[in-house]
Amino acid sequence: MSMYTGHVIGIDIGGTHFRIGAVGVDGTVQKADVIPSSFIGSAARPLEAIADAVKAYVRKTGIANSLCVSVGLPATVDRQRKMVYSVPNIIGPDSRHVLDNLNIVDGLEQYLDIPVLLNKDVNNLLAYDMFMQDLYDKEIVVACYIGTGFGGAIYIYGQFLMGKHGVANEIGHIPYYKGKEFCTCGKRACTECYASGRALKQLQEKYFPETFIGDVFLKHGAEAPLLEFVEACALPIATQANIMDPDYIIIGGGVVDMPGFPKEELLRQVKAHTRHPLPADDLTLIFSEQRRNMGVVGAAIYALTERGIQTSESFARELKLNIDKQET
Ligand SMILES: [Zn+2]
């Protein structure tokens, strides 16, 4: 038997799906489970319900020797990475934000007898992307993920950028000059009002009501409303380039992954809005290899590096080979 035993349970909680899986320290993976995340909002005690889902997964898969549980949430998380401030996508009865201001780590550890780690979901996505693209040795890596909202993460000088309160880089909420739309965060003129899956849905309903949202770039990608949308998506990415002068910019998320999304036009717009001659002339922009369970694997990778858990020498190679087994 290998001296490298044990695994990390990774959890990715989104507004729609709750995904749970496990990564072994030898690079093996357990098939991930996906269930509707609505069970959290409808539970009398949301954290107990999440803990029960962990126990059910452990029972079902028969995995032994769990080292820790690593949770990613679409939330602002405190600097100690224990408490969440605001999680607008996990709602209960009366649209109440059931996880807001909860200490997720201490709360879950009451029900589970192993350590719990908490992180912003986009940081886990960046952990995944840096692992897959071998970028952990770079000085500055920034990522922009355009999904339902617009999320970003920054890895700088060997760590994820946190900020005074832990809520640095809320790039989805930087202001657009003279913007009149209101954001789900309550503020006016946020990036997400113009550059997000939510904004794209509004454009489709207004300009292309006959077109299925999934086909909107295939059928109308060259028309003005969508070209403006792509420019709106490019602005925060160019902003990151101008502020950070990063080694790499990773671009991902469900919107970018849609059929017909004009990646070349996005890159052209990013470059056009970046300072010349540098960093514009030497930008390294790469697209994330989207996987449904990248948040689960990313949560596990984050926990392994954060806790300094020793992995087998063949860990990286094995995990890259096994990663597709996570897909459900
Ligand atoms: Zn906002």
Image (spheres, helix red, strand yellow):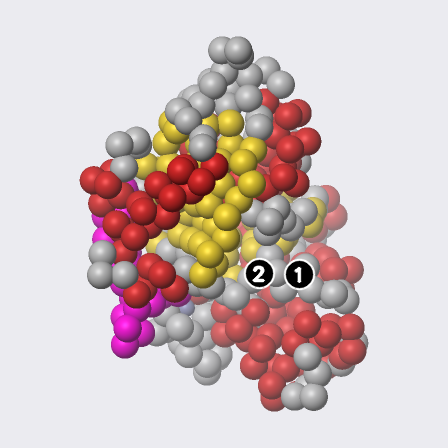
Residue 15, quarter of picture: bottom left
Q: Quadrant of ligand 1?
A: bottom left
CA separation, marks 2 and 1?
A: 7 Å
Residue 46: percent from the left, percent from the top? Answer: 27, 56
What residue appears at the point 46 percent right and 81 percent down from the top-left corner? 181
Mark drawn on residue 203: none
Helix, strand, or loop for circle 1? loop
Picture layout, residue 207 above or below residue 191: below
Looking at the image, is mark 2 or mark 1 earlier in the sequence?
Answer: 2
Residue 177: percent from the left, percent from the top? Answer: 49, 74
Mark drawn on residue 256: 1
Picture layout, residue 115 above or below residue 189: above
Q: Amino acid at mark 2?
A: Ile
Residue 74: percent from the left, percent from the top? Answer: 42, 56
Q: Is residue 10 left or right of residue 259?
A: left
Q: Main secondary structure of the magenta part?
A: loop
Picture layout, residue 157 above or below residue 256: above
Asked whether mark 2 lies closer than 8 Å to ligand 1, one says no
Picture layout, residue 306 above or below residue 154: above
Q: Give the magenta-colored segment's residue range.
A: 82-105
Q: Is residue 209 left or right of residue 46?
A: right
Q: Amino acid at mark 1?
A: Val
Residue 157: in sight, yes or no? no
| Residue position for label 2 | 146
Taking the magenta stretch, the answer to whether it contains residue 84 is yes
